[in-house]
Amino acid sequence: MAQTDEFGEELADFVRRVAELKAARSVPADDLPTVLDAAIFELDHVAGQLWPRYESLSSTGPSGVASVDRQEQQLLKALFQRVPVPVALVDRETVVRRLNLAASSFTGVRAGYATGRPLTGFLAHADRAAFRSQAAAVARGEGDRSLTVHLQQQPAVPVRATLTALRPSGEPRTAVLVVLQPADSRVPSPEHVPGPVPTLTETTRHAALMDLVDAVTTALLSGPVGDPAGVLERAAGVLHGRFADWVVADVAGAAPLSRTTVLAPSDSVAGARDVAAQDPVACPLVVEAARGGSTALPVRPEDPDAFGRDTSGAPILVRANVTSLLCVPLTTAPGPVQGVLTLFRSGARRAFSMAEAQAMDMMSRHLALAMGAPR
């Protein structure tokens, strides 16, 4: 019991030091590197000292202290969440197990969404392979690592990622603790820190989506039906810019698939020409949608070749800096798929939501009806 009391006192001291670190966030920017170093030291203290002692007490202590151990474990989880430094716990495949509040604010990704997805999915494509390799090396016990990466939503801002091994209690494999901080050791001002998805009310979101559905339906009713290419071109004109940065339309006719419309940002004229010249059969996402009739909603697509490559061999998704996409088959079940509509969002624009995917699914049926209607 004396060991448990001593552990509790040391943990209480740690809580007080964390509170002091939180209060130190208001110090001048030039002094923040010292605060960050202290926070990383405290995290290392938890991983190297407090956690092993907790494991020892859990395995050797009497059953009467089980409830106390559970309380201590809950406290450690709370501390992980409240530490004022962006921290993520990932496995050797970089799949996120935990993301604390500071990391959620720093990356602009909510913890509930990030959990179960690879952390590499939130990084620029060029950094993903290196990060995976370093995380695997740390998990194998080859020592701590540190490297510079870039978040996909802010590719111009370098981020320093520090990786250290951690063995969670009762688990056979080593996890990796990842600490993120600006590479220049200065914390960005609040207006430059990527925040979470904008907190619009459900009513406002619903109204905006209904306005979009109305605009697309109006465009369909304002022109001739039965002309698949013409129908898709009118709908694409409404969706482009307002709903997506890129709109790519493919029609299923006598040939397996034919590309009819490509609308891109004004600064991507050359990219639009390459996408227009691409054979849709070389786009795995489009082929799968046309074959299976199911909508795909990948956020920060992990596979850079999911939409094929351009004439130079560069992946389309990487060249267009795609951060979220919707690939929607155009069909009136149980009828055949008449075409596929693919929408890209790029850069810092927020990802497609499930509500937006549902609205797009509704519009896809309207499009399929207009495409298949008699002239």
Image: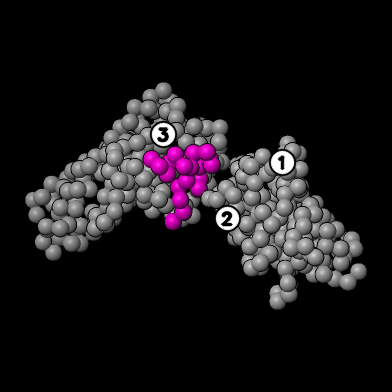
Instruction: Give the extent of the magenta segment.
Output: 116-134
| Residue 147 tag number | 3
Q: What residue type is labelled 2?
A: Pro
Q: Which element carries disc 3, helix, strand or loop?
A: strand
Contact between marks 1 and 3 (CB within 8 A): the answer is no
Residue 178 vs residue 216, the one in the foreground: 178
Residue 298 is tagged as 2
Which is closer to the viewer, label 1 or label 3? 1
The alpha-carbon separation of the residues under discs 1 and 3 comes to: 31 Å
Q: Can residue 293 be seen in this view?
A: yes
Residue at point 76%, 47% (across, down): 277
Tell me if label 2 and label 1 are in contact, CB under 8 Å.
no
- Residue holding disc 1: 271
Indicate whether 226 appears above or below 269. Answer: below
Question: Of 233 and 218, which appears nearest the observer?
Answer: 233
Q: Is residue 307 above or below residue 35?
A: below
For disc 1, the neighbor class at 10 Å (few under 14, some 14 to 19, many from 20) is some
Callout 3 amino acid = Leu
In space, the residues marked 2 and 1 are separated at their CA atoms by 21 Å
